[in-house]
Amino acid sequence: MNIGIPKERRPFEYRVGLSPAGVEMLVQRGHTVFVEHEAGLGAGFSDQEFERAGAHLVYSPHEVFGRADLLLKVTRPMQDEIEWLNQGAALMGLLHLASTRQDRIDSLLANKITAIAYEQIRLADGSMPVLRALSQIGGLMAAQIAARLLQNNWGGKGILLGGVAGVPPAEIVIIGGGTSGTCAAIAFLGMGAHVTVLDKSMDALQRIHERFPQVVTMMSTRRNIDRACAFADVVVGAVLVPGERSPIVVPRETLKDMKQRSLVIDLSIDQGGSFETSRPTTHDHPTYIEEGIMHYCVPNVPGVVARTATHAFVNAAMPYIIEVADSGAAAAIESNPALAIAVNTHAGEMRNLQRWAAQEEE
């Protein structure tokens, strides 16, 4: 199979769809891999490393898209990139199509693209192996982002996360006790903050309580969210519904009762956001103020730790990439339920995708 690895064109996206090690594995299995010139530069992979792994370098995005029977991306393709794909080609990436514009979906359907979303690959036990790797990174990064944004020179309240003798630590509230929320709790605890986690699942709360007895756990009800946000210095939204828009769990009225100049970090923004006041931002302009509260709503948080993030998601996604490459997309999704549930478009039909009206131009 011909496999294409393009250079990501979205701002501040430094990851690449496959590492040289992944390329080598595919080439050894008889596949032909085309890598766009400097595709791996942001993640620290040179063209020479890809060539040594057996890849063929190409020097235009049109060529890498046009040669590919299977295209491996990080983020969902832009409109012109979809048009460059061959009809009937397969696409794998962190697509988050639930929050894209309808015309992108229409183009994928019209071109009969088989779009497989890494973030929706789900095993029989409910675990999501590829998403888990990136959720871990996003959760861990939340603490270092918060530490910086609480500083006065970033417009924050001037609070040290861990406090010092005689001065209490910052109050951190995390809504969502899944992988991202748990990793955020680990990182904030490591920096000495006081952490409260809310979740709808008693099993999730029990797991966190047993592992981290010092964390306060609460059921995620509207009343408890209001109470927790009222004393928080930082609120982290880590809510996920696979293949659907993230539910809004923090309405505007709740923010109005928060302490002024507090910080919210919406890790769910790539699926629409879990705060009513959330809207996507970028790494060069990551924050804005709404209701007196600083908002950080960058969709591709792991994109700026590109080398770590690329290795992490490739490690997790490689078995599925190999299966699609070896068997073909149609046969792979027919035989593997974990892949089948991650298919968003196939043969001109939409699957496993709850659409919602995108509010932001890409």
Image (cartoon, rainbow, N blue to C red):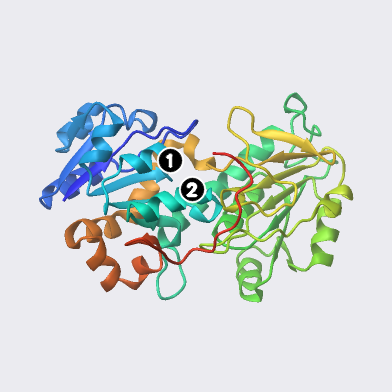
Q: Pick the residue in front: 230 or 189.
A: 230
Residue at 34 percent of width and 33 percent of height: 7
N-terminal-most mark, 2 or 1: 1
Amino acid type for the residue under numbered disc 1: Gln
Disc 2 designates what residue? 103
Q: Regarding mark 2 in the picture, which secondary structure is present there?
A: helix
Where does the image place residue 2, in percent across and percent down from the top left? Answer: 17, 46
Q: Quadrant of the C terminus?
A: top right
The residue at the point 30 percent across, 27 percent down is: 38
Residue 361 relative to residue 119: left or right: right
Q: Which residue is mark 1?
A: 79
Q: Secondary structure at mark 1?
A: helix
Crowdedness near tag 2: few (<14), some (14–19) or many (≥20) residues, C-alpha within 10 Å: few
* Residue 78 appears in the figure: no
From this viewpoint, is residue 353 visible? yes
Q: Residue furthest right?
A: 257
Q: Residue furthest front?
A: 110
The residues bearing labels 2 and 1 have C-alpha atoms spaced at a distance of 8 Å
